[in-house]
Image: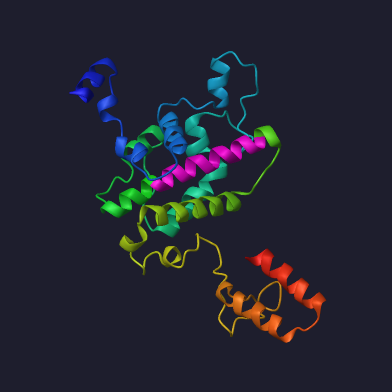
Amino acid sequence: MYRSMCSEKFPGISNFPHKAVWRAQVPSKICYFLWLVYHNRILTQDNLMRRGWNIASRCTLCEADIETTNHLFRECRFNNSIWSSFMQVLKVFGPHADEMQNVIHSWPTEDPSAWLERFIHLFLHAFTWELWKERNGRMFNDEKHSWQSIFHKIGRTLLSWVVTEGLISEINRNEWPWLHSHTCPGDRDLTLSPGDRGSGTVGGGLIHSSALPLFFFLLLVVAHSFVLHALLFFLSCLYF
């Protein structure tokens, strides 16, 4: 009844993708942001100009076209590589719609499994949120990052949300092994086997985190001087 009353007062609300926007297990402010994106209510430069702001309307990401909601998330050349890279990693077809509202409403278009649909919804939240933060960083703080950096930020955000929502157990290990190894797309797993140690760019390899307590304990047993004990205690505090 409530929804029917709302649909009479606000045409189109019955078709609003509630599940895609509000049911994702992400921070509420990010759900609200995606809701604003859907309704074209974020403060892109074209919307600011409609409110009377006298500002440049050029996109801060590509520095070529007018910044609109659709341009920022769908048309901008800067994020085309992000879209294509994630579609390749996720092994799914990208959205066919040109407008961001239709993307949120109808993607994925094929009949997906329940976990894939939930994952796509998480991706939309992470993609729009991280891209918006990059846009604001460029506009207000003169901080610029490459699309590869944004790609990794989205991947790390996705990974944390997938773990929180408990989707890992439902995802095929053979299709997306990077999720089960708890690494985001493109990141290198920092857990090295004995044969790999010494081959890293820093040199000498890495010590697995689980071995650190034993490592410091043995050094404390061997060390006899007060200075060494103090130094090792300080280092152990830094790591733990």
Residue for point 73% across, 67% down: 234
Which residues lie in the magenta part? 122-138
Residue 202, percent across and down? 71, 72
Residue 39, percent across and down? 41, 26
Q: In which quarter of the image is the N terminus?
A: top left
Residue 69 seen anywhere in this rendered image of the structure: yes
In the rendered structure, the answer to whether residue 175 lies left or right of residue 200 reads left
- Depth order, front residue of 13/63: 13
In the orientation shown, which residue stands out farthest toward the left?
1
In the orientation shown, which residue stands out farthest toward the top?
52
Query: Please, which colouring scheme is shown?
Result: rainbow
Q: In which quarter of the image is residue 142?
A: top right
Residue 123: say if magenta: yes
Q: Quadrant of residue 64?
A: top right
* Magenta span dominant secondary structure: helix
Residue for point 46% across, 56% down: 159
Residue 49, percent across and down? 58, 18
Residue 99 seen anywhere in this rendered image of the structure: no
